[in-house]
Image (cartoon, grey):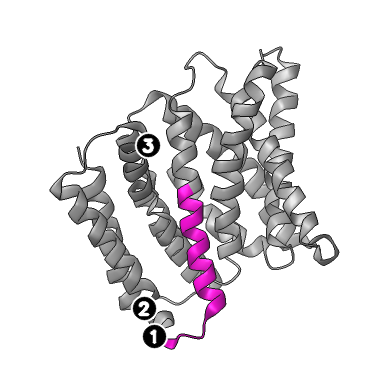
Amino acid sequence: MCLVWGTTYLAIRVALETMPPMLMASFRWLTAGVLLLIVLVARGEVLPARRDWPALAVLGVLMMSFGNGGVVWAEQTVPSGLTAVLVSGVPFWMTGIEFVGFGGEALSTRRIFGLILGFSGIVLLVWPELQLGHSGAFLIGVAATQIACFGWAIGSSLARRRHHEENILAVSALQMIFAGVSLLVVALAIGEWPALAVNARTGSALVYLIVAGSIVGYSAYAYALRHLPVTTVSLYAYVNPVIAVVLGTLVLGEPFSSRVVVASAIVLMGIMLVRRT
């Protein structure tokens, strides 16, 4: 999960070269969900009861429509590596949501300091654009990453509280389908269809996102979320930015400066303090 998801930021950036964001995300999740569901039905697996579908739709919209949709929207204007660092703030959101909404562990002094430290790192990352004051598209992209974090964190907290006896692959497939449909509705509503174009490079990136990023990566995340402590699962937040920054720099020539290195390290240190048991 850590290794695969670290590469998806590059794949998203490549796919966006010719594909509109919401339409691309819709194709990714809808195709992955349908393919996974076909395999499960062919194997005779038991699918979730229809009474559970509304709850699964909510999880799909939160984790993939908001979560991944926000990331895809952000990568139109924010470098892929920087997007990964900004999204690594998910543990901050999860800690706060668990405490406020689900009666989770109280915020200790160490965790509060970690939250402040991580937020400081994010501010350092975007400070040049904040000083310029005219890069509105970039700042909208940054805001989109935090909307993505918020949706993903709420969805993850709710998903952890579902029945453990459910078929995790079937649950994941339905969540993907519901998310894909909701993203398609948004894409059509904002008129993305006429702008759709696909070539060998962007098509390959989309296939990679469908197979590796969605079917393999998301299913692994859903399984880990059920069977491992949330502190362990959140370790992917340390690995993803490193892989994404390196790939973005080497493959796409994205900016890589000492400020990016220092700010990213500060964000990850904040995460470590927040998630430390």
Q: Mark 3 highlights which residue? A: 101
Q: Amino acid at mark 3?
A: Gly
Instruction: Specify whether residue 156 is painted magenta.
Output: no
Which element carries disc 3, helix, strand or loop? helix
Dominant secondary structure, magenta: helix
Disc 1 + disc 3, Cβ < 8 Å: no
3D distance between C-alphas at marks 2 and 1? 6 Å
Q: Residues within 10 Å of mark 2 (few under 14, many from 20)?
A: few
Along the horizontal axis of the image, is 224 left or right of 195?
left
- Which range of residues does the magenta coloring cover? 132-150
Q: Amino acid at mark 1?
A: Gln
Q: Closer to us: mark 1 or mark 3? A: 3
Disc 2 + disc 1, Cβ < 8 Å: yes
Look at the image and tell me whether residue 230 can be seen: yes
Q: Position of residue 91 (x, y in %)?
A: 35, 47
Q: Mark 1 highlights which residue? A: 131
Q: Earlier in the sequence, mark 1 or mark 3?
A: 3
Along the horizontal axis of the image, is 195 left or right of 5?
right
Along the horizontal axis of the image, is 197 left or right of 6?
right
3D distance between C-alphas at marks 2 and 3? 31 Å
Q: Position of residue 277 (x, y in %)?
A: 19, 37
Q: Closer to us: mark 2 or mark 3? A: 3
Residue at image position (40%, 57%) is: 241
Q: Amino acid at mark 2?
A: Trp
Q: Position of residue 232 (x, y in %)?
A: 32, 35
Residue at image position (71%, 61%) is: 202
Q: Mark 2 highlights which residue? A: 127
